[in-house]
Amino acid sequence: MDHKRIVFYLIIRLWHLQMINICLMMLLRMYNLVDKHYKKYILKNRALVRHETQLEYLDSLIGSSDINCVDQVRMNKRTFGVLCELLRADGRVKNDGLVTLEEQVCMFLHTPAHHVKNRTIRSRFKRSGETISRYFNSVLQGVLRLQENLLCVPEPVPADCTDDRWRWFKNCLGTLDGTYIQVRVLENDKPRYQTRKSDIATNVLGVCSRDLKFIFVFPGWKGSASDSRVLRDAISNPNGLKVPRAIVMLKAFLSPYRGTWYHLKEWGQRIPSNREEYFNMKHSYARNVIERCFGLLKVRWAILRSPSFYPLRT
């Protein structure tokens, strides 16, 4: 009798263990099915949701109104569209199917417009830091290829010009000046980039026409360099400022008289008393155009108003 009980007990235990194994196998099977469903549908839906979020944010930047578009990328929708077409045709910026050209340009413009870091763009556009850096440099190279399209061709001041600012300067092609852009450099390089006001900056030469359009921009010089030295280098550089040979030979760069009243704020209600002061006053009025250009540029692009987070070469 005891033997039969033992056999019966063992049979029950064996059946119990088999049922446990069957339940575990069913649970594992269910887990595999759930995991497969998650990977197939949930992650796919998450990617779709992420893509929709990217499109919604892009649409909020350039698809709502011109005012909002200017606030975000510093140009209206029409100008943004023209820039995209130029980059596609002449800048050779490709739309690889992963990131649209419009989104690439948005990421590029949003960075200097608001002077934000890569991690900020990554959070706003829902892209990886590597993706943002790659497309930023791609669009940057495309913009550099568009310099002939974006820069103005100068026209000399005609002899019958009636503009009181320019009619004194017949055949003048434009006005030029330098400006300082603050940068971040290594500690050992700071003395070379230190300006006379002790700022760490790079000296940028700009030339513009009388209607506030840039003709030439020459960046890269250290802040300690004088404007005349930067100008000489810009003229002698093979890819620099293209100046008619006659102007170079005649040294026909009109500079103000030294030691004489010059800046507009110095004049006030004062009337010039000799020809040097009169020339300086008219020269100051005309040269004020390039200062306005630099001022508008720095107001529009925040990255020009403070030391950049990005490498100096960029």
Image: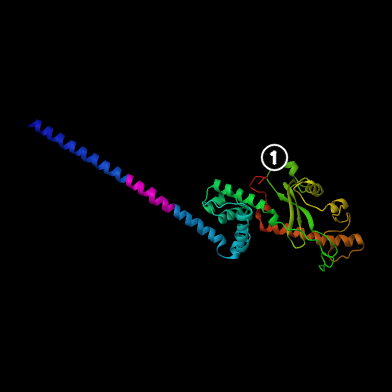
Q: Is residue 217 magenta?
A: no
Q: Residue at x 57, y 65 (%)?
A: 65
The answer to whether 43 appears left or right of 107 in the picture is: left
Q: Nearer the viewer, residue 50 or 298?
A: 50
Task: Residue under label 1, please give it.
Answer: 187
| Side (left or right) of 233 relative to 138 | right
Q: Main secondary structure of the magenta part?
A: helix
Image quadrant of residue 164?
bottom right
Residue that sits furthest to the front in the current view: 89
| Residue farthest along the right direction in this orientation | 274
Residue 254 percent location from the top left of the image: 85, 56
Which residue lies most toward the left here?
1
Tag 1: amino acid: Glu
x, y percent for residue 292: 74, 60
Residue at figure coordinates x 56%, y 55% from the top left: 103
Question: For this rendering, which residue is in front, 92 or 116?
Answer: 92
Q: Total number of numbered labels?
A: 1
